Image (tube, rainbow, N blue to C red):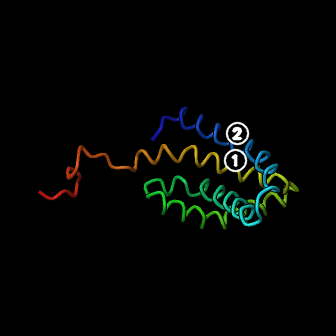
């Protein structure tokens, strides 16, 4: 686990990069094929809230399982987020919030990834090595 100041710095940097990335992506999206636009939107709008909600819970899993769980959780979390923003009459903020959540989640992803990768001294020297 990272110290609190380093973790806080990563989260804030991820939020700022994610929120700033949405206007750039929004400018490029009309020039992309329709399938790519759909997949990028789906990925940002589900993975962003999903990794923000499930990031700490899935820190010890491998990246593929973690991504699948984040997409599943994000399907529910994005619906909750859009409902809350709708009640506050702030629906235009949804893409920025989802991109910011994605940035924060990805900024913290590598810190937990380092923790979950086993370090071995050499071939056959792991915990399951047979002698």
Instruction: Measuring from the top left, give residue 66's x and y in whole percent.
Output: 50, 60
Please name the residue shown 59% across and 55% down the image. 51
Image coordinates for residue 94, horizontal then vertical, percent: 78, 55
Q: Please determine whether, in this image, residue 20 is positioned above or below residue 61.
A: above
Position of the C terminus by quadrant:
bottom left
Question: Pointer 2: residues within 10 angstroms few (<14), some, or many (20+)?
Answer: some
CA distance for labels 1 and 2: 7 Å
Residue displayed at 45% across by 48% down:
113
Q: Identify the residue at horizontal 65%, vertical 55% (top origin).
A: 48
Between residue 30 and residue 118, name the one nearer to us.
Answer: 30
Residue indicated by mark 2: 16
Residue 53 falls left or right of residue 91: left
- Circle 2: element type: helix
**Residues under numbered marks 1 and 2 in contact, where contact means CB atoms less than 8 Å apart:** yes
Instruction: Bin the neighbour count of mark 1 within 10 Å (Cα to Cα): few under 14, some 14-19, many 20 and up.
Output: many
- Choose between 84 and 51: the one closer to the eye: 51
Residue furthest to the right in view is 89
Q: Up-down: is 115 above or below 62?
A: above
> Which residue corresponds to the image point at 79% horizontal and 55% vertical from the top-left?
29
Residue 113 placement, left or right of 74: left
Q: x%, y% of residue 2?
A: 47, 38
Q: Residue furthest top?
A: 5
Q: Secondary structure at mark 1?
A: helix
Residue 100 - label: 1
The image shows residue 64 at horizontal and vertical percentages of: 48, 61
Precedes in sequence: disc 1 or disc 2: 2
Residue 40 sits in quarter: bottom right
Q: Which mark is residue 79?
A: none
The front one of 17 and 11 is 17
Give the position of the N terminus as an image quadrant: top left
């Amino acid at each position: 686990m990272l110290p609190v100041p380093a973790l806080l710095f990563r989260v804030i940097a991820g939020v700022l990069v994610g929120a700033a990335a949405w206007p750039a992506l929004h400018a490029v999206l009309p020039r992309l094929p329709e399938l790519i636009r759909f997949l990028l939107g789906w990925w940002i709008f589900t993975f962003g809230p999903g990794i923000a909600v499930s990031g700490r819970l899935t820190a010890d899993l491998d990246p593929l399982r973690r991504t699948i769980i984040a997409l599943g959780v994000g399907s529910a979390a994005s619906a909750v987020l859009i409902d809350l923003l709708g009640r506050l009459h702030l629906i235009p903020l949804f893409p920025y919030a989802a991109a910011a959540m994605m940035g924060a989640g990805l900024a913290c992803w590598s810190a937990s990834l380092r923790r979950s990768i086993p370090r071995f001294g050499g071939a056959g020297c792991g915990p399951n090595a047979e002698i």
